[in-house]
Image: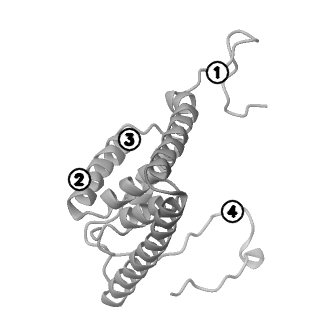
Amino acid sequence: MTTGAQTPAHPNARPRRSRLRTFLPLGLAAWLVLEIWLLTVVAGATSGFVVFLLLLAGFLLGSVVIKRAGRRAFQNLNEALQRGTPPSSGGGSGLMMLGGLLLMIPGLASDALGLLLLLPPVQKAVGRSAQRTVDRKLRTATPGTLGDAFQQARMHRPDGKVVQGEVIKNDERGEGEREQRPPLTP
């Protein structure tokens, strides 16, 4: 039985780990150490109560930003559906939500990064960079991968029309044995 997985040339050979799987845990550990170190430095310079107020303010601001960005994204989607057009990709709601999430995470470095993501010029630069990266990954997607599925999902007709139809399968059954199905209607 074939599962699609390649069998290793050597029975004890392990598959090679990607760079992301190797360095992500190290990066997260370094980020955590940086956050704790910054909190202790600020607590030593001021007091623990000031650190608590900073963390509380970050959490509250982050929740307000996420709520506002989510409401804006929902309004844009509603307006686009009423007009009958695809939703606009502008607005940076996703990056605003990410900035709000970073503000909600306890820590001063994540708060600074979250505040940076709330600035429109930074949102535009990060959005363009992310779009170029996604486009490049989709161009190099091989058949059968997740990137190929996204590329096929993004294909659409230039005029935006949807052609409704019904698939009729020819089989060996006679006319009297054919299964009756209702027509597809919107």
Reading the image, the residue beneath label 3 is 137
Judge by depth and name the residue closer to the eye, 7 or 183: 7
Q: CA distance from mark 3 to mark 1?
A: 22 Å
Q: Residue drawn 45% across and 37% down?
A: 142
Reading the image, the residue beneath label 1 is 15
Secondary element at image label 2: helix
Q: Residue drawn 37% across and 53% down?
A: 113
Q: Residue drawn 28% across and 48% down?
A: 129
Front tag of 4 and 3:
3
Looking at marks 3 and 1 on the same chain, the residue that comes earlier in the sequence is marked by 1
Reading the image, the residue beneath label 4 is 171
Q: Residues within 10 Å of mark 2 (few under 14, many from 20)?
A: few
Secondary element at image label 4: loop
Q: CA distance from mark 4 to mark 2?
A: 55 Å
Q: CA distance from mark 4 to mark 3?
A: 41 Å
Q: CA distance from mark 4 to mark 1?
A: 45 Å
- Residue lying farthest left? 121
Q: Residues within 10 Å of mark 3 (few under 14, many from 20)?
A: some
Q: CA distance from mark 2 to mark 3?
A: 18 Å
- Residue 33 seen in render: yes
